[in-house]
């Protein structure tokens, strides 16, 4: 058996098919009695992703060439026809596969925790990545004079390093708009890059009882309510202040006190400035959380 088929068989043997069938039963369409079942369709598409197929034609050609193993791989008894697969992709409700994906994410989170995290609580890193596309083929995704592209907005559970939310948009959608799509859990902490520095949206997170950590963007004017101005030579924390914004616009968007932390990162040889509404964790742990946010970039790579 080809190595790709062997790996695929090892992966799919752990998929809970009964749960998938429960989800399918909630969605009724005229494809229910097709020879290519929803389960067959799912496995065929997964197989194509695993071996790197670039088109449905390439995928169906490969499955046809290995028709003798089609049933054992979960593709059904009959060869997979490109026209049938294309119609199934078009007619079947994508919410079936979305719900199953999030079910698998929840299982993975439960199984992924093999050691206690340094901090107690729920922590999420938020970031996005842009994927360039060919302008002549993907005109609907046009965002620059010579480019097309999409952007994947992702929320990753820092503890398990597993994505729990993702949304695909055109590449020209600003990062901070993704903050409106997230469901904020009370007492959970959300770690953002400075591309999400939107004070009104951050204040919404605060009013919902959740916490955030974000890098400073620009040089907002503020007044110091409390904090030590001196540098602690025994720690990489240079400043830990309670501040309040001074300008009318920023003060109107975020009318409460904020914590401002200046932390020297030895790995980068320079300081970073963080804002947070969390006054409970130490400044070192706030900086630690932001360092974990960089795992999102590794995930995208």
Image (spheres, grey):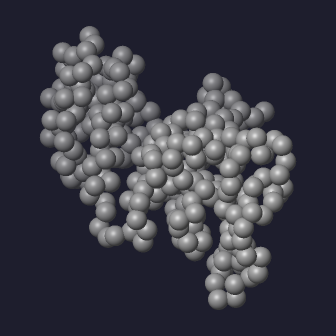
**Residue 280 showing in the rendered view:** yes
In the picture as drawn, the residue positioned furthest to the bottom comes out as: 234
Q: Residue at x 78, y 52 (%)?
A: 245
Q: Which x, y percent locates residue 21? A: 19, 29
Q: Which x, y percent locates residue 4? A: 30, 51
* In this rendering, position of residue 266 left or right of residue 57: right
**Residue 150 showing in the rendered view:** no
Q: Which x, y percent locates residue 132? A: 63, 41
* In this rendering, position of residue 242 left or right of residue 212: right
| Residue 38 location, quadrant | top left
Q: Image height check: is 301 above or below 91?
A: below
All told, the count of numbered labels is: 0
Q: Between residues 31 and 164, which one lies in front from this camera angle? A: 164
| Residue 140 location, quadrant | top right
Q: Which x, y percent locates residue 91? A: 36, 16
In the picture as drawn, the residue positioned furthest to the front comes out as: 225
Q: Residue at x 18, y 15 (%)?
A: 33
* In this rendering, position of residue 143 left or right of residue 30: right
| Residue 232 location, quadrant | bottom right
Q: Residue at x 66, y 77 (%)?
A: 237
Q: Residue at x 28, y 30 (%)?
A: 41
Q: Between residues 244 and 102, which one lies in front from this camera angle? A: 244
């Amino acid at each position: 058996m080809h190595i790709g088929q062997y790996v695929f068989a090892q992966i799919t043997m752990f998929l809970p098919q009964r749960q998938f069938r429960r989800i399918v039963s909630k969605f009724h369409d005229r494809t229910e009695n097709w020879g290519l079942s929803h389960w067959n369709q799912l496995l065929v598409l997964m197989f194509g992703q695993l071996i790197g197929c670039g088109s449905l034609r390439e995928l169906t050609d490969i499955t046809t060439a290995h028709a003798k193993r089609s049933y054992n791989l979960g593709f059904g008894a009959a060869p997979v026809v490109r026209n049938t697969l294309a119609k199934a992709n078009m007619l079947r409700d994508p919410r079936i596969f979305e719900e199953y994906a999030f079910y698998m994410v929840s299982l993975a989170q439960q199984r992924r925790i093999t050691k206690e995290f340094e901090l107690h609580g729920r922590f999420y890193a938020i970031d996005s990545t842009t994927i360039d596309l060919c302008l002549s083929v993907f005109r609907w995704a046009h965002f620059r004079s010579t480019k097309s592209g999409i952007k994947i907005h992702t929320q990753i559970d820092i503890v398990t390093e597993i994505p729990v939310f993702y949304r695909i948009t055109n590449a020209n959608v600003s990062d901070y708009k993704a903050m409106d799509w997230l469901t904020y859990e009370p007492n959970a902490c959300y770690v953002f890059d400075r591309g999400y520095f939107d004070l009104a949206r951050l204040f919404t997170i605060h009013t919902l009882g959740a916490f955030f950590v974000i890098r400073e963007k620009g040089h907002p004017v503020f007044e110091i309510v409390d904090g030590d101005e001196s540098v602690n030579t025994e720690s990489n924390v240079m400043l830990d202040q309670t501040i309040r914004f001074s300008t009318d616009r920023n003060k109107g968007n975020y009318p409460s006190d904020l914590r401002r932390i200046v932390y020297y990162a030895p790995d980068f040889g320079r300081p970073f400035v963080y804002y947070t509404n969390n006054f409970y964790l130490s400044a070192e742990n706030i900086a630690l959380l932001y360092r974990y946010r960089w795992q999102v970039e590794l995930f995208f790579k």
